[in-house]
Image (tube, rainbow, N blue to C red):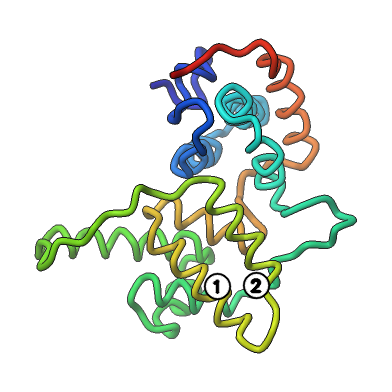
Amino acid sequence: MRKPSSPDFDPVEDAPHHMGQPMPFWFVAQALIEIEECSGKNSQTYVKEIIANVFRAAIAVNAEELPALFYFFIVKLAPEYEALETGVGHELVLKSVAKACGKSPKQIREQFHKEGDLGVVVAVGKKSQNTIGNFFGAVTKVKKTQGLTFSHVFNSFTKIANMSGNSSMQERENTIVRMLQDGDKDEAKYIVRWLQKNLKTGAAEKTIISALARAVCYTPPDKVGVKK
């Protein structure tokens, strides 16, 4: 399966999911990793192509996810007129990272001051957890989750935004912690960055719009193949 950065990317054959199924969140995270690696005078062209290929995979396999994917990449939940925000601040994200990584808020705060990016902090914490788990082995067998899907992540963001009442802050924290625990280190990194409104793609909103236009042009919704 070719990566989203491949010039030969096929939105049907290279999509990581089957027709009508939700897109795995790791595929979106992989695209964001590739975007971070882009550099040089043509970097924005490469960024646009990578994002366009993610959109193309959605169009070809599960077009219902396309609007949410677009809003995800521009770090919004809905059109501006809906004024829908997660209401999640830095401290809440920091506490969630601490719980997901099994560390104290003080330890996470110190790491944040060193790294300057809570996304990197949670990725390092998740990697350390995996290393320790592999070293000692599993004491008991735990049923593995099937992995995060993009729809689950974006719907969780929307759910967080709609929470209200006296227990809403705790509910927001619990929802974030569950996502961070269920995701791998890269998925967790971009969940945290999205919640902090900075995916660090270097792409302006007009670049995302251009990528969407390219995707629709390259992969018209009524002219895609079938992946069974």
Question: What number is the disc on residue 93?
Answer: 1
For this orientation, the residue located farthest to the right is: 81
Cβ atoms under marks 2 and 1 closer than 8 Å: yes
Dividing the picture into quarters, in which one does residue 56 lie?
A: top right
Label 1 neighbourhood size at 10 Å, few (<14), some (14-19), many (20+)? many
Dividing the picture into quarters, in which one does residue 61 lie?
A: top right
Q: Residue at x 61, y 86 (%)?
A: 167
Q: What's the CA distance linking mark 2 and mark 1?
A: 7 Å
Q: Is 171 rendered above or below residue 140? A: below
Q: Position of residue 137 (x, y in %)?
A: 10, 61
Question: What number is the disc on residue 88?
Answer: 2
Say which element carries label 2. loop
Q: Name the foreground residue: 15 vs 92.
A: 15
Residue 119 shows in this picture: yes
Q: Residue at x 53, y 30 (%)?
A: 20
Q: Name the foreground residue: 225 vs 38.
A: 225
Q: Amino acid at mark 2?
A: Val
Say which element carries label 1. helix
Q: Residue at x 65, y 41 (%)?
A: 69
